[in-house]
Amino acid sequence: MTQYFTAPFFEEVARRLNADAEWSKKAAAVSAKVVLTCVDRNASFLIDVVNGRVTSSPVGPDVPADFKFEGSYEAWTQLGRGERDLQSLVMGGKIRFRGSLPKVMGLMGVLNRVTVISREIPKDF
């Protein structure tokens, strides 16, 4: 089992997305840098998508990215457990978003696939 919101967890997310047929169809033309930050654990990870191919790496929270999401570990675990979705966490102020709102709205289908895949990974919270 993988510990949630760690480098091995995000490496597994990237591996599973790259092997996922639905992701390959939806994200083939997508290139974006997304930074996810857990503010109370000083942990930030870059999900780098280039023409649908995903890599992940630990980064500093200030690394340049197209989209940034910042929240507490509690907020991220609500997402990881399937208790809340990303949109409701952002709209409710639990996760802060930085970036172009129109661009991220166009990528919600792709981002939702990332969430679905990450929820399937056996993990400890």
Image (cartoon, rainbow, N blue to C red):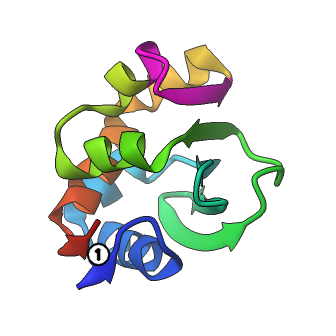
Residue positioned 58% across, 27% down in the render: 96
Position of residue 24 relative to residue 91, above or below, is below
Q: Position of residue 41 (x, y in %)?
A: 58, 60
Residue positioned 45% across, 50% down in the render: 73
Position of residue 118 relative to residue 84, above or below, is below
Q: Secondary structure at mark 1?
A: loop
Whether residue 28 can be seen here? yes
Q: Amino acid at mark 1?
A: Ala
Whether residue 32 can be seen here? no
Q: Position of residue 74 (x, y in %)?
A: 38, 45
The quadrant in which residue 49 appears is: bottom right
The quadrant in which residue 78 appears is: top left
Name the residue nearer the viewer: 66 or 89: 89
Q: Which residue is mark 1?
A: 19
Residue positioned 60% across, 27% down in the render: 97
Q: Judge whether residue 3 is colored magenta.
A: no
**Image quadrant containing the C terminus:** bottom left
Q: Describe residue 98's horizontal placement relative to residue 108 as left or right.
A: right
Q: Describe residue 78's horizontal placement relative to residue 59 as left or right.
A: left
Name the residue nearer the viewer: 71 or 48: 71
Name the residue nearer the viewer: 61 or 99: 61
Instruction: Sort mark 1 into few (<14), some (14-19) or many (20+) by Cα contacts within 10 Å.
Output: few
Position of residue 121 relative to residue 118, above or below, is below
- Residue range of the region highlighted in magenta in the rendering: 90-99
Residue positioned 23% across, 85% down in the render: 1
Q: Judge whether residue 93 is colored magenta.
A: yes
